[in-house]
Image (tube, grey):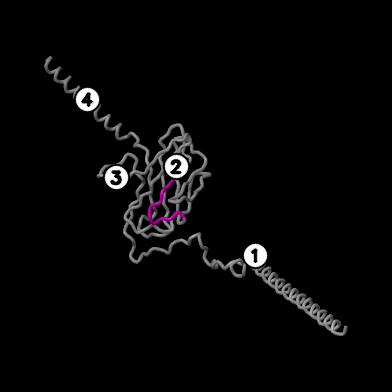
Amino acid sequence: MYASIHRQARAGSRVALAGAAALTATLALAAPAAAHAEVEADRPQALAENVTLSFVSEAESSSAGFTTLRIVLPEGVAPGDVALGQAPKGWKLTATDDGYTVGGPALNAGVDAEHTIKVRQLPDAKELVFKTVETYSDGKISRWIELPTGGEEPEEPAPVLKLKAAAPGAKPVSPSPTESMPPGAAEPTPSAATSRPDASTAASDTAADEDDGMSSGALIAVTVVVLLVLGGGAWWLVKRRAASSRI
């Protein structure tokens, strides 16, 4: 009888241990996953036009809220091809050299940052990577910029959007106009300085001409005076010789 009771106690202990293990596994599965950043598209297809992308940055701070998100756009998507759709109240989009930032008043602690953008056209690719840098109101920065290496999942993976193959006949649209030369702008015309002689040069030439004129006039005047003097002297000498011969 005692052996039977002992066996029942051991069986009950094993059941209790199994139940505890199952409960632990269930709690582990129910625990929230680590925060991360994600991206989705309403039409995840290569060369699709006017596509809306939705970004979600999950909050990982219990004491500070998001203030700014910086998104690095993948190759084939220019900052000028992006327009802000929905965003937290007061948040605005600012283009950067390699993407854009969206931010504004700090969100409440624990609130995810969600925003959408409209892209003019997705590039012809199999997947797009949107590296994301998150800034909190307390100065904390989270960088979701890592890519898988060696088949291992990184600790802070960058948001990746998988794309379907382009639709038959789909082609890239013309690139956005550049800001360096607006459409219809006239080519620069030569300036007045290059289309006519320099004023200082003209003045110098005029002064030189005047100097030449004055030099020529002075030379002629001197020559006339010399001739007059010589002529007068010769006349006086002839007259004196004549007077001497009569004496």
Mark 2 lies on residue: 113
- Depth check, mark 2 against mark 3: the one in front is 3
Mark 1 lies on residue: 200
Mark 4 lies on residue: 17
Which of marks 3 and 4 precedes in the sequence? 4
Residue type marked 1: Ser
The image shows residue 167 at horizontal and vertical percentages of 34, 62
Q: Quadrant of residue 30?
A: top left
Which of marks 4 and 1 precedes in the sequence? 4
Is disc 4 placed on a helix, strand or loop?
helix
Residue type marked 2: Ala
- Depth check, mark 3 against mark 1: the one in front is 1
Residue at 35%, 45% (x, y): give it: 158
Residue at 44%, 35% (x, y): give it: 140
Q: Residue 240 versus residue 219: which sits nearer the camera? A: 240
Distance from disc 1 to disc 4, alpha carbons, whole Å, reads: 104 Å
Q: Residues within 10 Å of mark 2 (few under 14, many from 20)?
A: many
The image shows residue 232 at horizontal and vertical percentages of 81, 78
The image shows residue 101 at horizontal and vertical percentages of 47, 47
Asked if labels 1 and 3 touch by Cβ distance under 8 angstroms, the answer is no
> What stretch of residues is rendered in magenta?
70-79
Which of marks 1 and 3 precedes in the sequence? 3
Mark 3 lies on residue: 148
The image shows residue 78 at horizontal and vertical percentages of 43, 55
Residue at 46%, 61% (x, y): give it: 176
Q: Quadrant of residue 200?
A: bottom right
Distance from disc 4 to disc 2, alpha carbons, whole Å, reads: 42 Å
Q: Quadrant of residue 9?
A: top left
- Depth check, mark 4 against mark 3: the one in front is 3
Distance from disc 2 to disc 1, alpha carbons, whole Å, reads: 66 Å
Distance from disc 2 to disc 3, alpha carbons, whole Å, reads: 24 Å
